[in-house]
Amino acid sequence: MSIEKERALLIFLPAEGSQPDLIARRQAEMLALADSAGLEVVDTLSQKLRGDQRQLGKGKAQEAAAYMAAADIDVAVFDRDLTPSQTRAMEKALDRKVIDRATLILDIFAQRARTREGRLQVEGAQLARLLPRLTGQGTALSRLGGGIGTRGPGETQLETDRRHIRRRLAQVQRDLKKVSAERQVQRAAREAQPHPFVVIVGYTNAGKSTFLNALTGSDIYAEDRLFATLDPTTRRVSSPLGELYFMADTVGFMEDLPPELTIAFKATLEIVKEADVLIHLFNVADEGYEDRIRVVNHFLRDLGGEGIPMLYVANQVDQLDESPYLGGLFKDEPVVALSAKTGQGFDAFWQALRPLAEKSLFAQPVRLPNSAEGARLLALAHESGEVSQLSATEAGISFYLRGDRDRLAGPFGPYIKGPEDDQD
Ligand SMILES: Nc1nc2c(ncn2[C@@H]2O[C@H](COP(=O)(O)OP(=O)(O)OP(=O)(O)O)[C@@H](O)[C@H]2O)c(=O)[nH]1
Ligand SMILES: [Mg+2]
């Protein structure tokens, strides 16, 4: 079996009037995607779409077909989503396998998925994408299902039909439910401890994993590849200021992610909703970082992350000659500049994180009455928070309580001890 990379021609079809710098960034991103998928990009071809043109023109297609044959290119990769009929038309015109942007991204995810949950989610996305494309098209099916090489769920689908895929999809969804029950157990274990839960989010390849590694001294997989991380990893981190946090790394976002994929990964990304603080990390050395921040914020809104305190982290400042001006971007939200690689700016990061994390924290002196109700609440305090400086007098049971605000503020709010009741 050959381990040679498949040789690819990238095809860009920018809409008329697209900004040149946007096109350039999009091309760079597509190159990185192809590279991350393990393709060897031999060349790129670009044609501006005119009027209601949706597809590579006939002349251009002939040119591309001749070139691909001469240069021994196996696959044409389009930087856009193609409908099944567009894919078939292009495969015919180019006489080569055709892959669109969504298939490419799904393929990268399929290669990266390590955990059971990750694999199930990717398979679910691939099946969901395949289903509406199964319209009894004979041979086209093998190509659509295949992705790059022979990966993906393609092989079994070759000799099967829609019903089989539906059945498999239902099974995947059932399995995912089971896995998600396991995650609930982990979540309960995390919530039993009174440390703020901090979730790092951002565009793919911004440096999220590198940053979490730098904070914890662990070695989560980080690489100059898109979608290096698929599965969230949670670590306990202690700050130089003495606080303890739970911090999680997440899968990166990207413009135009296939919708099947974002639906499939909703389960994994549930942790966004559970966060006490979100760290939105971006690569400030990247020219298009403002657009990327917007893309990520859009995903966060969809995932229920709105309203959670957010700290922006401008990463990779070591790549800039001078410190970046960030004032114009963020209204009231705090931002710190740092380098996950060199460690510069970390002090400012910890300082900025503390007040945000405290918003999620209940940390108050309380006094409970000497009654059955007081005893019940004391048991609850021990169970859901951290109790210290406990003393019992005739005036009541006093202690200092620390823990998750959502859990503690309700029951203990009425018993917060004010300065005036200090005589006990
Ligand atoms: N120069 C420089 N490179 C960095 C810095 N932080 C991360 N990198 C590099 O950026 C690349 C991507 O880093 P990752 O940590 O894998 O990025 P990520 O955000 O986790 O990416 P995904 O998991 O793919 O979403 C790696 O090659 C890192 O070495 C930094 O502060 N400075
Ligand atoms: Mg990562």
Image (cartoon, rainbow, N blue to C red):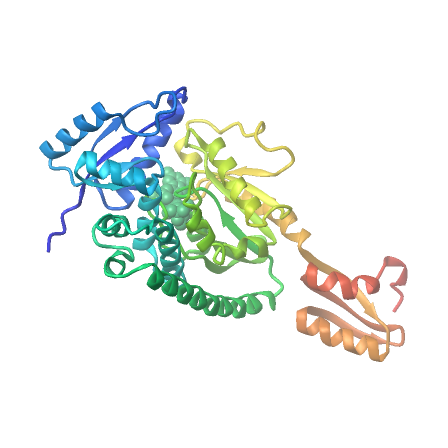
**Where's residue 225, x and y in %?**
32, 45
Residue 14 seen in this snapshot: yes
Q: What residue sits 80% from the left and 65% below the top?
A: 366
Q: Quadrant of the C terminus?
A: bottom right
**Where's residue 54, x and y in %?**
35, 29
In this rendered view, identify the residue nearer to me: 37 or 158.
158
**Where's residue 80, x and y in %?**
35, 36
In this rendered view, identify the residue nearer to me: 11 or 208.
11
Considering only vertical position in the picture, is 143 above or below 89?
below
413 relative position to 32: left or right: right
- In terms of image quarters, where does ligand 1 lie? top left
**Where's residue 259, x and y in %?**
44, 46
Considering only vertical position in the picture, is 236 above or below 63?
below
Q: What residue sits 36% from the left and 56% below the top?
A: 127
Q: What residue sits 33% from the left and 22% below the top?
A: 48
Residue 238 seen in this snapshot: no
In the image as oriented, which residue stretches furthest toward the front?
A: 136
In the image as oriented, which residue stretches furthest toward the bottom?
A: 372
> In terms of image quadrants, where is residue 392?
bottom right
In this rendered view, identify the residue nearer to me: 414 or 355.
414
Q: What residue sits 52% from the left and 68% below the top?
A: 186
413 relative position to 287: left or right: right
In this rendered view, identify the residue nearer to me: 72 or 61.
61
How many tags in the picture? 0
424 relative position to 307: left or right: right
Q: Quadrant of the N terminus?
A: bottom left
> In terms of image quadrants, where is residue 94?
top left
